[in-house]
Amino acid sequence: MKKLLIYLKDYKKETILAPIFKMLEASFELFIPLVVAAIIDIGIASGDKTYIIKMCGIMVALGIIGLVCSITAQFFAAKAAVGFATKLRHALFAHIQKFSFTEIDTIGTSTMITRMTSDINQVQSGVNLVLRLFLRSPFIVFGAMIMAFTVDIKSAFTFVVAIPLLSIVVFGIMLVSIPLYKKVQGALDKVLASTRENLTGARVIRAFGIEETEKKQFAEDNRLLLKLQQHVGKISALMNPVTYIIINGATIVLIWLGGLQVDAGIITQGEVVALVNYMSQILVELIKLANLIITVTKALACANRIETVFEMEPSITEKLPDANFKENKEKNVPQIIFENVGLTYQQGADESLSDISFTVKKGETVGVIGGTGSGKTSLVHLIPRFYDATRGKVFIDGIDVKDYPLKTLRNKVSVVLQKSVLFSGTIRENLLWGNEDATVEQLMEALRISQAKEFVEQKEDGIDSKVTQGGKNFSGGQKQRLAIARALVKKAEILIMDDSASALDFATDASLRKAIREMENAPTVFIVSQRAASVLYADKIIVLDDGKVAGIGTHEELLKTCQVYEEIYYSQYERPGKEVKEGK
Amino acid sequence: MDKKKKQLQTLKEVLSYIKKYRIYMLLSVILAAASALLTLYVPILTGRAIDFIIEAGRVDFYGIKNILIEAGIIILITAVLQWIMNVCNNKITYHVVHDIREEAFEKIEILPLKYIDGKSHGEIVSRVIADVDQFSEGLLMGFTQFFTGITTILGTLFFMFRLNVGITILVVCLTPISLFVASFIAKRTFSMFKLQSETRGEQTGLIEEMIGNQKVVQAYGQEEKVLKRFDEINERLEKCSLNAIFFSSLTNPCTRFVNGLVYAGVGFMGALAAIHGKITVGQLSCFLSYANQYTKPFNEISGVVTELQNALACAGRIFELINEEPQTPETENAYVLKNVEGKVDLEDVCFSYDTSRKLIEHLNLSVKPGQRVAIVGPTGCGKTTIINLLMRFYDVNKGSIKVEEKDIKNITRKSLRTSYGMVLQETWLKNGTIEENLKIGKPKASREEVVEAAKAAHAHNFIKRLPKGYDTYISEDGSGLSIGQKQLLCIARVMLCLPPMLILDEATSSIDTRTELKIQNAFAKMMKGRTSFIVAHRLSTIKEADVILVMKDGSIIEQGTHQELLGEKGFYFNLYNSQFAI
């Protein structure tokens, strides 16, 4: 929480004023029993009606001042809390945006979304409540005690005993029951998980005929939940009766002591009434305080979760300030060099890529092929520095990618990711992500190359057709082609297509590759695929197997020398010699 | 009217669950009333005690002592009653929740798949979890609160009227103002809250889209622009949140102010009455404490009423689930399939999910024991539907399906289903260790058998590399496993129990072709002598089938071996060429 407090900095005034006004309000409330005592002792005793009217007028006046103070406090508290949350949200969003793929993979997007939304909302109401009540409640509790002392010292000692006793009971029960409630929550989560599981897995569960086992398991979980709930229920059931006994017991003692003091002529009857009133004020506030603490604990837990996100540093950072950077103008260096590159995703884990070395000349087409989990995506993601190589080096135009300003580097490389994502808006807006200043002609050209022109033109609004969130109103193949078009609009020197034509049929896939080859200033292209057909005609095919290079070469060379490639190829094409020949 | 009827119906059902605990319920209600009345009686005693304290030398200690002893006993009794009431309430609440959940879960196990497929799972889960919780809290707790509230109000009125009519009327007339103020503020702030939640929704939408796809955002270097869009919404949210929070937070100070006015009014009237000797000082102090308490039950009750309605609505949703029609129960003398050889016949089968859209019409098929049947066809042609029918996940509308010459409607579901080994495209694993997952169909299998099956499915190698090997715990989403790996586990699961017939629905769709080729050998071994139904899109899987069924729009349009079908140069020929050749 501490680190998050800096976002309250701009609301110092509000943060201080809100509790002060709250305390002012509370102190006016503390005067009320004294006024009542005066009415009884002076007004009633002497039958002075004007005095009574005056005193009641004072009570109303105190009420009005209290109302004004309280409204002021509510305003400052709300302003500080809302402003704090706004600043926090902005900072967190900006921070998350800096995360590299590594952090995104480890935290998971759904977690980050919860942190951004419900967690921040919880913290906001936590801050709001703390500003309003955290000082007020203890202030009233101790204030009432102090006021009692001003009335009569001897009787006031009842408060000195009752308040700690009450606190022990209220907070003791809370302390004991909070961890128990956590256990209940855990048991409930289990019941929930098992319910969900039996819905999503209904087919499998029935296919294996294990409904009875599942029922038994559920009954067990459900019974455990019941047991835990009853256990914690028994404890929290004590709260009300015990506090009731303490407060009323204290009142009895108070009256008895008060009687003694009145008899001795030290205090008056009205003052006894005042003491009793103070006692009942305390109970109300203590209960409020207990509820407040529950809310605050929740908010603190949320704050800690948010903090851990802040503590996570983006692993990919820029080395040089932009101004100092000079691009390499030399023409005869290979465009891309991988030098003994290794990649480990998590510390201690095995390398996902190891000893990768190859060079690519400008304008070449490189195919990357291999089974699932062989490291194809990891390999191409090293080029735009989505991940950093943990061993070895990656060079573009002779400069280590780590020495590029990120913006310059990513302008050089255009990537079509495996999962084609479109954003809500129009097709045009989506394409303009590639280059804000692209003309309509350029956009149409990109659509033509990506084989998307036809279906876009068939749409009623053409390029201005709506795209719903996630591009759900397009088929998988259409989305892939639009994502490719978006990447083409960028006109980067290097184009990486990460299995991004998997939903296209073979003919479209082939025309796409042809169109890209025939582009003016054709970029260097990486085609990642599981399909042998997609990489067949590449200038160079990199075959990956379990994170290692199994072979590099052209299709013909690899077919002769690389067993892995041969196996992949013939798992998709018939071996020659059989009656039916597919493929070429 | 109809709604009322439905609510009444729900109420009846609720009562049927509570029936088991009716003694506790009755006890709870009586205790609530008793403790409320006793609680109200205490201020009167305190007032009387104060009246014995007049001034120096005029304190009646004997009188005070008696009253205080009486008060002490009443306080103790009240506390005990409260405690018993709490325990009763807990018992009822938690047990009813437990019972309802159990019933709901048992229902889920026998609901027809039609229901499960047609409803959002999240929604059903929220009925079983959140709705049940809210129902129990709202209805049961609300019930006692409601009762306590009413008793308190009536009791307070009774005691106050007995003390002094004029002051009571003042209290009765003034207190509604605070309720009025509260509802006035609530109404005015409603639109602010709506705006706030709309803006929040807009922001969450942007967060989901941009953080969810941050990789794309970064690939295009759009971070700054996205942040700008975010900030714009964020600023709007700040403004409308401030309005909503501030104005709604006025409720508390305003109602407290009104209560303060009532308090002052009571003080004034009471003091005047005291001067005229109509009430004593003790009674005045008693009045003041009533005036403090009187508004509370009103606020509570108005809350309880909405909560009760809410709870009834929740209960309605749960009962809707519990009362849902289950799958057709099995006939008493349903046949238990044993020693299956694998003869399957579909005779004139008609089926559709939705009566307005025909799907499968007059389908006939006869499969001999040990035959390998491949089903191919374009998306949506009914391939998976056939599997739903074979497994009796859905019942045919017309015609019949027979296994070993017996209509599957007369076979126990369990014995029918366990005769098939099923691997689906969509991989489902349960929460538990890898081993537990593999043993799902054969709980008594030994570790050796499990490893054997995993090896056959080519899953052993990656399992070995997991942190705890076969004891690695996998959670709902199969954390950390790729879809391909999950598919391998699903295959291993079937390889372990080896049922007499097999159903493979795109079982290897997420596995790369090279690994698939290796699994094929294991599959081939497994399929030997077993009747198998295979839905696949890959050439290698289909080609070796004994019969290929080519489906289009719900009916089989071509049937034969790979070579025969190619020779026909029909639909299969075209499909084959468009999918497998350049």
Image (cartoon, coloured by chain):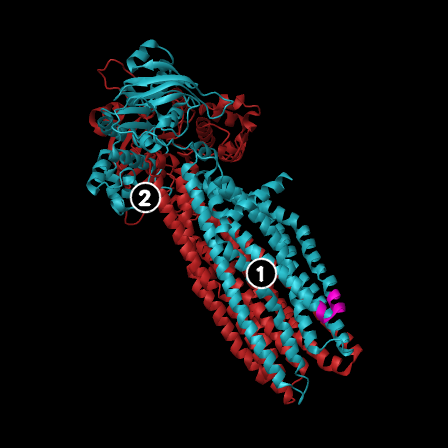
Chain colours: A red, B cyan
> Which range is magenta?
B161-170
Taking B148 as reference, is A191 left or right?
left
Dot 2 corresponds to which residue?
A: A389
Q: Quadrant of residue B45?
A: bottom right
Q: Are marks 1 and 2 in contact (CB under 8 Å)?
A: no
**Residue at the spot 47% in from the left edge and 35% down from the top edge:** B325
**Residue at the spot 74% in from the left edge and 73% down from the top edge:** B270
Residue A94 appearing in the image: no
Q: Is residue B253 above or below residue A247?
A: above
Say which of A484 and A205 sits in front. Answer: A205
**Residue at the spot 72% in from the left edge and 72% down from the top edge:** B267
Percent across and percent down for residue A405 are 42, 44
Say which of A192 and B418 sits in front. Answer: B418
Q: Around disc 1, counting alpha carbons within 10 Å, would you say few (fewer than 14), some (14 to 19), or many (20 or more)?
A: some
Measure the C-alpha gap from mark 1 to mark 2.
Answer: 44 Å
Q: Secondary structure at mark 1?
A: helix
Q: Around disc 2, counting alpha carbons within 10 Å, would you say few (fewer than 14), some (14 to 19), or many (20 or more)?
A: many
Q: Secondary structure at mark 2?
A: loop
Can you tell which mark lies on residue A11?
1
**Amino acid carrying mark 1 in the image:** Tyr
Say which of A48 and A26 sits in front. Answer: A48
Taking B98 as reference, is B195 left or right?
right
Taking B408 as reference, is B75 left or right?
right
Q: Is residue A252 above or below residue A348?
A: below
Q: Chain of mark 1?
A: A
